Image (cartoon, rainbow, N blue to C red):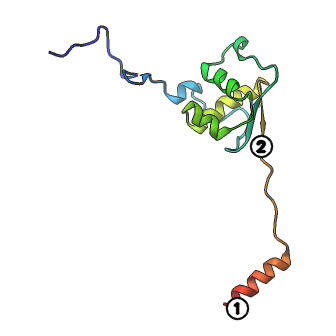
Amino acid sequence: MRAESPGPQHEWLDAAAGPVVRPYTLTGGRVRPAVEGFDLVAFVLAAPAADPTGQPGLQPEHRRLVELARRPVAVADLAAELDLAVGVVRVLLGDLLARGLVAVHEPRATAYLPDESILKAVVSGLRAL
Protein backbone atom coordinates (compact mmCIF):
# COMPACT_ATOMS: atom_id res chain seq x y z
CA MET A 1 0.00 0.00 0.00
CA ARG A 2 1.30 3.48 -0.97
CA ALA A 3 1.62 6.13 1.72
CA GLU A 4 -0.17 9.31 0.68
CA SER A 5 0.59 12.68 2.14
CA PRO A 6 -2.33 14.15 4.08
CA GLY A 7 -4.43 16.87 2.50
CA PRO A 8 -5.47 17.57 -1.08
CA GLN A 9 -2.95 17.22 -3.90
CA HIS A 10 -2.61 20.10 -6.32
CA GLU A 11 -1.22 20.06 -9.85
CA TRP A 12 0.74 23.24 -9.07
CA LEU A 13 2.69 21.58 -6.29
CA ASP A 14 5.74 19.56 -7.25
CA ALA A 15 7.41 17.60 -4.46
CA ALA A 16 10.88 18.02 -5.96
CA ALA A 17 10.63 21.65 -7.07
CA GLY A 18 8.18 23.07 -4.56
CA PRO A 19 5.30 25.32 -5.59
CA VAL A 20 5.22 26.07 -9.29
CA VAL A 21 4.22 29.59 -10.31
CA ARG A 22 3.28 30.27 -13.90
CA PRO A 23 5.11 33.18 -15.58
CA TYR A 24 1.91 35.12 -16.31
CA THR A 25 1.14 35.25 -12.60
CA LEU A 26 4.47 37.00 -12.00
CA THR A 27 3.64 39.66 -14.58
CA GLY A 28 -0.05 39.99 -13.80
CA GLY A 29 -0.88 38.70 -17.27
CA ARG A 30 1.21 41.38 -19.00
CA VAL A 31 3.44 40.32 -21.87
CA ARG A 32 5.07 43.67 -22.64
CA PRO A 33 7.01 45.91 -20.28
CA ALA A 34 5.62 49.33 -19.35
CA VAL A 35 8.71 50.82 -20.97
CA GLU A 36 9.42 49.68 -24.51
CA GLY A 37 12.02 47.00 -25.01
CA PHE A 38 15.15 45.88 -23.25
CA ASP A 39 18.01 44.55 -25.32
CA LEU A 40 19.35 41.20 -24.11
CA VAL A 41 22.79 42.72 -23.62
CA ALA A 42 21.54 45.96 -22.01
CA PHE A 43 23.04 46.49 -18.58
CA VAL A 44 20.79 47.01 -15.58
CA LEU A 45 22.00 48.87 -12.50
CA ALA A 46 20.03 49.44 -9.31
CA ALA A 47 19.60 53.03 -8.20
CA PRO A 48 22.03 53.86 -5.37
CA ALA A 49 19.30 54.26 -2.76
CA ALA A 50 16.94 51.64 -4.22
CA ASP A 51 15.02 49.92 -1.42
CA PRO A 52 12.38 47.58 -2.84
CA THR A 53 11.26 46.37 0.60
CA GLY A 54 9.16 49.46 1.26
CA GLN A 55 7.48 49.39 -2.13
CA PRO A 56 3.92 48.05 -2.18
CA GLY A 57 2.96 45.71 -5.01
CA LEU A 58 6.43 44.31 -5.64
CA GLN A 59 6.93 40.58 -5.73
CA PRO A 60 9.96 38.66 -4.45
CA GLU A 61 11.25 38.47 -8.03
CA HIS A 62 11.27 42.28 -8.23
CA ARG A 63 13.28 42.45 -5.03
CA ARG A 64 15.71 39.82 -6.26
CA LEU A 65 16.24 41.74 -9.51
CA VAL A 66 17.16 44.88 -7.56
CA GLU A 67 19.58 42.90 -5.40
CA LEU A 68 21.22 41.30 -8.44
CA ALA A 69 21.52 44.70 -10.14
CA ARG A 70 23.60 46.26 -7.35
CA ARG A 71 26.40 45.73 -9.86
CA PRO A 72 25.87 46.15 -13.62
CA VAL A 73 24.38 42.99 -15.08
CA ALA A 74 22.95 42.11 -18.49
CA VAL A 75 19.24 41.41 -18.94
CA ALA A 76 20.04 37.91 -20.26
CA ASP A 77 22.13 37.17 -17.16
CA LEU A 78 19.28 38.29 -14.88
CA ALA A 79 16.90 35.93 -16.66
CA ALA A 80 19.38 33.08 -16.29
CA GLU A 81 20.02 33.83 -12.61
CA LEU A 82 16.30 33.89 -11.78
CA ASP A 83 15.54 30.96 -14.11
CA LEU A 84 12.77 32.99 -15.75
CA ALA A 85 11.90 33.68 -19.36
CA VAL A 86 13.49 36.84 -20.74
CA GLY A 87 10.02 38.24 -21.51
CA VAL A 88 9.02 37.92 -17.86
CA VAL A 89 12.24 39.61 -16.72
CA ARG A 90 11.65 42.45 -19.18
CA VAL A 91 8.17 43.06 -17.76
CA LEU A 92 9.48 43.01 -14.19
CA LEU A 93 12.34 45.35 -15.11
CA GLY A 94 9.81 47.70 -16.69
CA ASP A 95 8.01 47.87 -13.35
CA LEU A 96 11.27 48.63 -11.54
CA LEU A 97 12.31 51.22 -14.12
CA ALA A 98 8.95 52.99 -13.82
CA ARG A 99 9.46 53.22 -10.04
CA GLY A 100 13.00 54.53 -10.43
CA LEU A 101 14.57 51.53 -8.71
CA VAL A 102 16.82 50.59 -11.62
CA ALA A 103 18.44 52.21 -14.63
CA VAL A 104 18.90 50.45 -17.95
CA HIS A 105 21.91 51.22 -20.13
CA GLU A 106 21.30 50.11 -23.71
CA PRO A 107 24.28 49.23 -25.89
CA ARG A 108 25.29 51.72 -28.55
CA ALA A 109 23.81 51.11 -31.96
CA THR A 110 26.37 49.72 -34.35
CA ALA A 111 25.64 51.92 -37.31
CA TYR A 112 29.14 51.68 -38.73
CA LEU A 113 29.07 51.33 -42.48
CA PRO A 114 32.27 50.55 -44.36
CA ASP A 115 33.77 53.15 -46.66
CA GLU A 116 32.51 53.09 -50.25
CA SER A 117 36.00 52.38 -51.58
CA ILE A 118 36.18 49.20 -49.46
CA LEU A 119 32.85 48.01 -50.83
CA LYS A 120 34.01 48.67 -54.41
CA ALA A 121 37.21 46.73 -53.78
CA VAL A 122 35.22 43.78 -52.42
CA VAL A 123 32.91 43.78 -55.45
CA SER A 124 35.92 43.96 -57.79
CA GLY A 125 37.56 41.07 -55.95
CA LEU A 126 34.40 38.96 -56.21
CA ARG A 127 34.10 39.66 -59.94
CA ALA A 128 37.69 38.61 -60.42
CA LEU A 129 36.93 35.17 -58.98
The answer to which image quadrant residue 96 occupies is: top right
Residue 31 at least partly seen: no
Q: What element carries label 1?
A: helix
Vertical placement of 57 versus 119: above or below?
above
Placement of 30 over or under 36, stated as above or below: above
Give percent across and percent down for residue 17: 42, 24
Q: Could you tell me the amino acid type at mark 2? A: Glu
Asked whether 114 or 30 is in front, the reply is 114
**Residue 30 placement: quadrant:** top right
Q: Do labels 1 and 2 touch, CB within 8 Å?
A: no
Q: Which residue lies furthest to the top in this view?
A: 6
Name the disc covering residue 106, or none: 2
In the rendered image, the quadrant that contains the N terminus is top left
Total residue callouts: 2
Q: Is mark 2 on a helix, strand or loop?
A: loop
Q: How crowded is mark 1: few (under 14 residues within 10 Å), some or many (20 or more)?
A: few
Relative image position of residue 95 (x, y in whole percent): 70, 26
Q: Which of marks 1 and 2 is nearer the N terminus?
A: 2
Q: Nearer the viewer, residue 3 or 32?
A: 3
Q: Position of residue 58 (x, y in %)?
A: 66, 18
Q: Which residue lies furthest to the bottom in this view?
A: 128
Disc sitting over residue 21 in the figure: none
Q: Quadrant of the C terminus?
A: bottom right
The relative height of residue 23 versus residue 18 in the rendered view (above or below) is: below
Residue extending farthest to the front is 71
Amino acid type of disc 1?
Ala
How far separated are the C-alphas under marks 1 and 2? 42 Å
Residue 81 in percent (x, y) is at: 59, 33
Residue, disc 1 = 128
Q: Residue at x 76, y 31 (%)?
A: 45
Residue 54 visible in this rendered orientation of the protein: yes
